[in-house]
Amino acid sequence: MLVAVPAETRRGERRVALTPDAVATLTAQGHSVRVESGAGAAALASDEAYRDAGAEVVDGDVLAEADLVAHVRPLLPEQVARLRRGSTTVGFVTGTGELPGIQALRDNGISALAMELVPRISRAQSMDALTSQALVAGYRCALEAAMRLPRFFPLFMTAAGTVPPAKVLVLGAGVAGLQAIATARRLGAVVEAYDVRPSSADEVKSMGATFLDLGLDVVEGAGGYARELTEDRARRQQEALTPFISKSDVVITTAAVPGRPAPQLVTKDMLAGMPAGSVVVDLAAESGGNVEGSVAGEEVQVGGVRVYGMADPASAMPVDASRLYARNVVNLLALGLSEEGFTLDLDDEVLAGACIVHDGVVRHAPTAALLED
């Protein structure tokens, strides 16, 4: 089987789908791997490293003859058009504005495994790219906040006096939020956190942070995810969070609802109460934003507060993000790989859950509905 690894073409994307270590795993199993020259450069994976792992490095198109294509960001329609009918792709597929690419996969007879649709079950933990990339993103957003805050994160006791620690509030305690908490704590900040899911309280406390109980009704979605709030509950949540935000030096927001725009947690009026020089990092800026006025990839000033909207945060740390992602991809492919090639076994719940397009059919119901509209 021929596996292709194209260079990522989206602006700002620095990850690569398969690192040399992952390529070595595939070549050791007897598969051929073709890598586009420079595909791993931003992740410090050189062409020579790929050759040493057994890959063929090509200065040009690697898609046309591939049986399987590993990618990070969704393929563009023009890339899909170069694929061989009956081939398979594996990578992130869905997202705002990606419907043309999905339609191209369907119309060109390409099967596609979406890494973001891998079921969150115990058996699939090693294949869960959302979790691995969220870990990178959460770590990075805490560093971004620390670099922008014009004061120390930790407590310092000096001959010239005591410098109190920064107060950090993390909204959303999923994988990214927990990693942001852990990183802020390692940097010495005093950390509080809130999540609409009360089940997150123990995890927050285990990281050394204080979990905020706002006295609101329980909200828990399927699979441990948060679910969308009613307008009334969202308003009451904002009111309850306001005093905690006003006393924070840093606010990091990481809340997301699968398949929907990010919930707005913080309004401009809420930011107005924060101390001058405070910093807000919105990890959800690309999906609509948790913070009113945040812009993905930009820093904006709202009163005396610096609001930074993160854009593709995992790409800011491409070496480890690529290493983790590549292992996720290889572990998923292992479910269908054999000496004969790759078999998409739809009786396997993991492969079936991740399969978004197969045999000219969009299998993911929400995406199919959008294409029909």
Image (cartoon, rainbow, N blue to C red):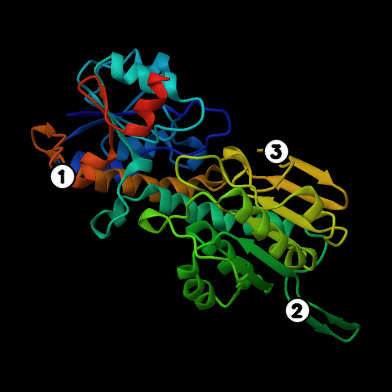
Residue 6 point in image, percent of width and height: 39, 27
Q: CA distance from mark 2 to mark 3?
A: 32 Å
- For the N terminus, the image quarter is top left
Determine whether the residue tagged by mark 2 lies in a helix, strand or loop: loop
Q: Is residue 230 left or right of residue 238?
A: left
Q: CA distance from mark 3 to mark 1?
A: 40 Å
Residue 189 image-quadrant placement: bottom right
Q: Earlier in the sequence, mark 3 or mark 1?
A: 3
Please give the label number shown on residue 155. Answer: 2
Residue 184 point in image, percent of width and height: 63, 67
At a point 15% along the width and 40% down the height, the residue shown is: 336
At a point 23% along the width and 57% down the height, the residue shown is: 123
Q: Is residue 49 left or right of residue 310?
A: left
Residue 192 can be seen in this image: yes
Q: Which residue is mark 3?
A: 295
Q: Which residue is mark 1?
A: 348
Query: Is there a contact, CB below 8 Å, between mark 1 and mark 2?
Result: no
Q: Earlier in the sequence, mark 2 or mark 3?
A: 2
Query: Looking at the image, how many numbered discs can be counted on the residues?
Result: 3
Q: CA distance from mark 1 to mark 2?
A: 52 Å
Determine whether the residue tagged by mark 1 lies in a helix, strand or loop: loop
- For the C terminus, the image quarter is top left
At a point 15% along the width and 44% down the height, the residue shown is: 348
Farthest left residue? 340
Residue 60 can be seen in this image: no
Determine whether the residue tagged by mark 3 lies in a helix, strand or loop: loop
Looking at the rendered structure, the kind of residue marked 1 is Asp
